[in-house]
Image (tube, grey):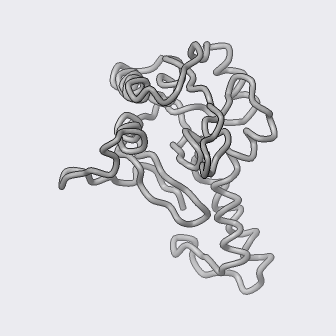
C-alpha cells in the first residue's frame, strides 16, 4: 500500500503535467498491469512514480520538428519490450560506455583495474548493486523501490547526471512549465540513494 505522502506527490505530479495541456492521458495503470511490468522488467516502481502512473498514463504525441525523442514517455502498457528494456538499461550502459571509452571511474569504486576488460567487469558488478533507475520521461529517471518516494528526478546521459527536480511533482514543474528552470535559494536537491 502506498502511503499518503507518496500518493499526494504522484497525484500532484499528474495534475501539474495535465495542467500544461501538452499531453493526453490514458487511464492509469491497474494493479495487474503494475505487477506484470515489475515482474517482466525486474524492478518495483517507487511509490510516488506508481501513484503518478496510476492516476493517468501520459501518451506520446508525434514529435515536433527538432525534437530529440520520438517517444519520450515509456509505454508501460503496450510498448515494445525491447525498447522498454533499453530505456531501463540506458543509465548503466551509459556509465559502462564511459568506463570503456572515456576512462571514467567513480572514486567510490576504489582503484581502477589496469585492463579495460577488468575495469568494465568491476564497474558492471558495482552498478548491479545500486537501485534500478526507472525512466520517467526521455532520459529522466527515478530510483526504483517499493516503499520509497520523494527522490529527486535525475537527467542521465552517460556519466552526465544532473538534478531535474526535487521530487516527481517538482520535476513536472521544472520540465514542462513555461517558467522552467526558475528556482530560488531553497531549491537544493540531494541524492537520496547511492548511485555509485
Q: Quadrant location of the C terminus?
A: bottom right
Q: Farthest residue toward the bottom?
A: 114
Left or right of residue 40, residue 23 in this image: left
Q: Nearer the viewer, residue 51 or 25?
A: 25
Left or right of residue 22, residue 8 in this image: left
Residue placed at 61% from the left, 35% from the top? 73
Q: Nearer the viewer, residue 193 or 57?
A: 57
Residue placed at 33% from the left, 51% from the top? 181
Instruction: Locate residue 91, reporting x and y percent.
Output: 63, 55
Which image quarter: residue 101? bottom right
Instruction: Locate residue 43, reporting x and y percent.
Output: 65, 36
Left or right of residue 97, residue 174 in this image: left
Q: In the rendered view, tell whether residue 120 sits above or below residue 164.
A: below
Instruction: Locate residue 194, reporting x and y percent.
Output: 48, 55
Left or right of residue 192, residue 93 in this image: right
Instruction: Locate residue 79, reporting x and y percent.
Output: 75, 30
Which image quarter: residue 115? bottom right
Q: Nearer the viewer, residue 101 or 5?
A: 101
Residue placed at 44% from the left, 26% from the top? 21
Residue placed at 52% from the left, 71% from the top? 108
Q: In the rendered view, tell whether residue 130 sits above or below residue 7.
A: below
Q: Farthest residue toward the front?
A: 65
Which image quarter: residue 185? bottom left
Amino acid at each position: 500500500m502506498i502511503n499518503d505522502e507518496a500518493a499526494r506527490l504522484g497525484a500532484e505530479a499528474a495534475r501539474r503535467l495535465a495542467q500544461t495541456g501538452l499531453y493526453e492521458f490514458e487511464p492509469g495503470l491497474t494493479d495487474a498491469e503494475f505487477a506484470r511490468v515489475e515482474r517482466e522488467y525486474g524492478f518495483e516502481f517507487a511509490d510516488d512514480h506508481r501513484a503518478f502512473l496510476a492516476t493517468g498514463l501520459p501518451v506520446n504525441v508525434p514529435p515536433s520538428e527538432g525534437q530529440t525523442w520520438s517517444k519520450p514517455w515509456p509505454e508501460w502498457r503496450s510498448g515494445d519490450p525491447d525498447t522498454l528494456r533499453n530505456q531501463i538499461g540506458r543509465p548503466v550502459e551509459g556509465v559502462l560506455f564511459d568506463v570503456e571509452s572515456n576512462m571514467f571511474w567513480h572514486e567510490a569504486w576504489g582503484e581502477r583495474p589496469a585492463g579495460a576488460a577488468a575495469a568494465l567487469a568491476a564497474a558492471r558488478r558495482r552498478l548491479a548493486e545500486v537501485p534500478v533507475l526507472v525512466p520517467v520521461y526521455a532520459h529522466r529517471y527515478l530510483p526504483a523501490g517499493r516503499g520509497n518516494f520523494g527522490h529527486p528526478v535525475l537527467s542521465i546521459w552517460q556519466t552526465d547526471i544532473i538534478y531535474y527536480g526535487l521530487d516527481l511533482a517538482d520535476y513536472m514543474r521544472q520540465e514542462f512549465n513555461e517558467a522552467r528552470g526558475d528556482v530560488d535559494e531553497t531549491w537544493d536537491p540531494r541524492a537520496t540513494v547511492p548511485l555509485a
